[in-house]
Every structure is written in structure tokens, then in C-alpha cells.
Image: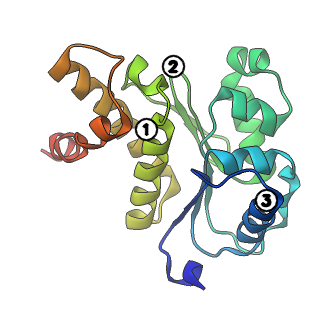
Amino acid sequence: KQLSKADAVLIGPGLSLNSESANFLFDIIENVKSPLVIDADALTLLAGNIEILNQRKSSAEIILTPHIGEFANLSGRTTEEITVNRFEITSEFAKKYNVNVVLKSETSISCTRDGKVYINNSGNEQLGSAGSGDVLSGIIVSLLAQTGNAFSAMVCGNYIHGMLAESYYNKFGNKQSASQQDLIKFIPNVITGILS
């Protein structure tokens, strides 16, 4: 019932990997009418039933936000194959399942469901820290709720996320010590800087 009120939905962080969570996830994917972001535990569960993506009743946008290891599980390709051919493999996957993909790595990319790939040029090693991906998925779902546009949410979300890490480095002089809360505190300044 709550889904019908949502401008956008994020599922995955903190979800857990039990069968009840899997059934809940698959029900949402199949029936949700709002744009959907799938991250974290939900990606692990989805890898066990990837064909559910082609059984959706709605044409609402879906954005998957895997790192390379998670994408290997989803795509059935090795991490080595993805590292060498990430653009081609991500593009093929996006078109096959009619989804958008943000592939997180040292250089994150956004791939639209028609297979077009966009490379993000902001960020540093800080984004490899635990929990950083949750910050990114939160930013993306917020932008998706505001705009309804998956392309804008992915590309702008990736860029903002990278700028958080750069802002932290500019202020504190290191790329390793920021927590998720530290990065989140920079969101207003980063967005103000982009808009000004």
C-alpha cells in the first residue's frame, strides 16, 4: 500500500538475505509502478532470479547499482571479464533486462536501458569505503523521486557522490577516513556549488 504513495523506491540496504526478503523483493519488482532503485542485499537476491526483471507488469524505470562483484553475480560473467569489457557487458545486460545500471568501481559508469554508457569523472578512493554505496543509492533515489528521470538521477547522482569525496579530501587532506555521515554532510555544499 505504501508503494502507491511513493515517487520512487529504494530497496536493498539492510534488507537481509532470507527467503521472505527474496519473495518481498520479487513481488515489488514484478508489481511496483514507481521508479525503483535496487542496491546491496537486493542485488544478491536478484542474482538468484534475474529473469524476474523481464516479468514486470509496469514499464517504470529500474536502476541497479552494483559494484563489479555484484554485477558478476547478476550477469554471470567473471570480474575479470567485466573489468576488461565493462562498457560492452553492462550495455548488453541493460538492454537484455530493460534496466538502467550504475556500475560502481574506481571509475563509475551509468548505463541507460537502451545501452548508452556515461563515464563519471568525479571522486577518489574514498568511494571504495564500506557504506559509500548506500550514500550513492540514497542520492540516486532522491533525484529519481524529484525528477522521475533515471538518466538524470544516475549521471547527476554519480557526479554528486564523487564530489562529496573530493570535498572531504579538499577539507581534510585525506582520501581514506570519511564515514558515510561525513560524506552526507557535504551534500548541501556540493549541490550549491553545482547550481551556482
In the displayed structure image, the side of residue 54 where residue 189 appears, left or right: left
Of labels 2 and 1, earlier in sequence is 2
5 lies above or below 14: below
Instruction: Using the numbered discs, state the Cα–Cα distance from disc 1 to disc 3 in whole angstroms.
Output: 27 Å
Residue shown at the point (71%, 27%) measured from the top left? 69
Residue identified by numbered label 1: 158
Q: Secondary structure at mark 2?
A: loop
Residue type, label 1: Asn
Residue 104, percent from left and from top = 56, 31
Disc 2 target residue: 106
Mark 2 vs mark 1, CA separation in Å: 12 Å
What residue does disc 3 label? 22
- Residue 65's tag is none
Residue 10, image x and y in percent? 55, 59
Residue type marked 3: Ala
Question: Position of 35 compared to 143: left or right?
Answer: right
| Residue name at image x 41 percent, y 44 percent | 157
Left or right, 55 with respect to 16, comes to right
Indicate whether 40 appears above or below 67.
Answer: below
Q: Amino acid at mark 2?
A: Glu
Q: At x 75% / y 20%, what residue is drawn?
A: 79
